[in-house]
């Protein structure tokens, strides 16, 4: 069994300040972890993924995440927010066996204030 | 290379009507999935397929059926639509290799309203 908890449903930051979106996961197996972004009325775009290689993962648009097995966390960060980062962010876990379906967190809505 | 496409983009149904959503991918992916997205709940898996001719139930399969007659297509059917099926539906595909799950590629979604 696997699950994902996104610790904040809404995060608001000012443009140019750091972004931190928090995610904890639970998995019976060694998991793959992803962050997806969804802009309003759009589909989902992959930001980055962890698949048991380096624990610090760099993604698109300056985002990165660190896999911490001891804390079962996979927090998403960005040093400096841009207005275009305003969107919904989903932390996702998948077992590396079986149907390999994704289990989604409930999402964090990021607001970026000018 | 279109990736994952979904037809239609929008649909309004009356309670009891039926319809089929079509998903097509041109990446030669083995695995395909149907999800629904409801406010505050992320995406939930309805049905999935690990290859042509195979289908299986996900977390929320009731009221839906699927078919995968061709590798590139995955159809989602609603036999008798209910207001609880008002949602945004996403199709996805992936190609797992070895012991690692690679990312899924998502279609643009179908917004379905059942009145």
Image (cartoon, rainbow, N blue to C red):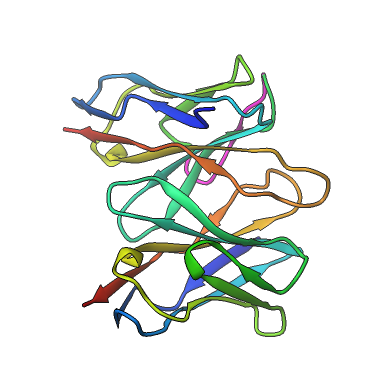
Q: Nearer the viewer, residue A31 or A87?
A: A87
Q: Nearer the viewer, residue A67 or A107?
A: A67
Q: Which residues are magenta?
A: B53-60
Residue B58 left/right relative to A111: right
Residue drawn 33% across the image and 61% down it: B40
Q: Is residue B91 above or below residue A90?
A: above
* Place of residue A88 in the rendered image (x, y in percent of width and height, measured from the top left): 36, 62
Q: Is residue B84 above or below residue B50?
A: below
Quarter placement of the C terminus of chain B: top left
Residue A86 within the magenta-colored segment of the rendering: no
* Residue placed furthest toward the top: B69
Quarter placement of the N terminus of chain B: top right
Q: Is residue B26 above or below residue A82?
A: above
* Place of residue A86 in the rendered image (x, y in percent of width and height, measured from the top left): 31, 66
Q: How many marks?
A: 0
Residue B57 within the magenta-colored segment of the rendering: yes
Name the image quarter holding residue B50.
top right
Residue B74 left/right relative to A98: left
Residue drawn 27% across the image and 39% down it: B86
Residue drawn 29% across the image and 69% down it: A83
> What secondary structure predominates along the stretch shown in magenta?
loop
* Place of residue B105 in the rendered image (x, y in percent of width and height, measured from the top left): 54, 42
Residue B66 left/right relative to A56: left
Q: Is residue A84 above or below residue A67?
A: above
Residue drawn 26% across the image and 20% down it: B17
* Place of residue B27 in the rendered image (x, y in percent of width and height, measured from the top left): 62, 29
């Amino acid at each position: 069994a696997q699950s994902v908890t996104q610790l904040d449903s809404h995060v608001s930051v000012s443009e140019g300040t750091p972004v931190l979106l928090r995610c904890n996961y639970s998995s019976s197996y060694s998991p793959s972890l992803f962050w997806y972004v969804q802009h309003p009325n759009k589909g989902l775009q992959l930001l980055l993924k962890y698949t048991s290689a380096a624990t610090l993962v760099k993604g698109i648009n300056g985002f990165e995440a660190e896999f911490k097995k001891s804390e079962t966390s996979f927090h998403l960060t960005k040093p400096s927010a841009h207005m275009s980062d305003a969107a919904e962010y989903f932390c996702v876990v998948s077992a590396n066996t079986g149907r390999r379906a994704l289990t989604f967190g409930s999402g964090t809505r990021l607001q970026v204030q000018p | 290379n279109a990736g994952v496409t979904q037809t239609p983009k929008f649909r309004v149904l009356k309670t009891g009507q039926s319809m089929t959503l079509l998903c097509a991918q041109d990446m030669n992916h083995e695995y395909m999935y149907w999800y629904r997205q409801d406010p505050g709940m992320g995406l939930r898996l309805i049905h999935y397929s690990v290859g042509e001719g195979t289908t299986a139930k996900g977390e929320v399969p009731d009221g839906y059926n699927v078919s995968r007659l061709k590798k590139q297509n995955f159809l989602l059917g609603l036999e008798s639509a209910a207001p609880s099926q008002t949602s945004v539906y996403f199709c996805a595909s992936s190609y797992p290799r070895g012991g690692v799950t690679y990312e899924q590629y998502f279609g643009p979604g179908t917004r379905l309203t059942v009145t």
